[in-house]
Image (tube, helix red, strand yellow):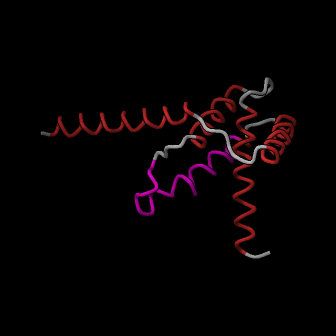
Amino acid sequence: MGMLDKLGAWARRVKRDGLTLWFAGRHPRTPWHAKALGLFVVAYALSPIDLIPDFIPVLGYVDDVLLLPGLIWLAIRLLPADVLAECRVQADDWMMTKGAKPRSRVGAFLVVCVWLALTAGAWFWVRARL
């Protein structure tokens, strides 16, 4: 198995686990802390807008390559084993039948709110310095 095959398999697992978190967020036996983190991660992952835009050299891909997989890994670790197994089956079924990931308008809204808050904070900070 070559390096590209390993990277492709890793990317498919990350995609499947992101979708697994989407199903786990709706599962009644998911603990509240795992549900909160999982829903945040899913909203961000499914958002069409990135926190760090991809057109920014190098930094634009940090969230796609490091931040998002790290948060998915953490949220998956918080799920009970039986819930994780059940939600992974649902995610695999979704990927086989639908193929495309769902979109999240809530995630896009949250990312826009973060950008607005950062912009407002920077504006107030600069204004206080003048």
Q: Residue furthest bottom?
A: 2
Which image quadrant is residue 74 in? top right
Is residue 41 placed above or below 1 in the rendered structure? above
Instruction: Please give the count of numbered marks on the rendered protein.
Output: 0
Q: Quadrant of residue 27?
A: top right
Q: What secondary structure characterizes most of the magenta part? A: helix
- Give the residue at x 45% y 63%: 58
Q: Is residue 127 left or right of residue 92?
A: left
Q: What residue lies at 17% left-to-right and 35% top-to-bottom?
A: 128
Residue lying at the far top of the rendered structure: 28
> Taking 52 as reference, is 29 left or right?
right
Query: In the rendered view, would you say 31 is above or below 63?
Result: above
Q: Nearer the viewer, residue 52 or 67?
A: 52
Q: Any magenta on residue 40? A: no
Instruction: Name the one closer to the observer, 95 or 123.
Output: 95
Q: Specify the quadrant that holds the C terminus.
A: top left
What are the residue bounds of the magenta stretch?
52-75
Residue 62 shown left or right of residue 15 in the figure: left
Please state which of residues 76 and 105 is positioned toward the viewer in this rendering: 105
The question of residue 69 being in magenta is answered with yes
Q: Residue at left 36%, top 34%?
A: 116
Q: Which residue in the rendered view is the most extreme toward the left?
A: 130
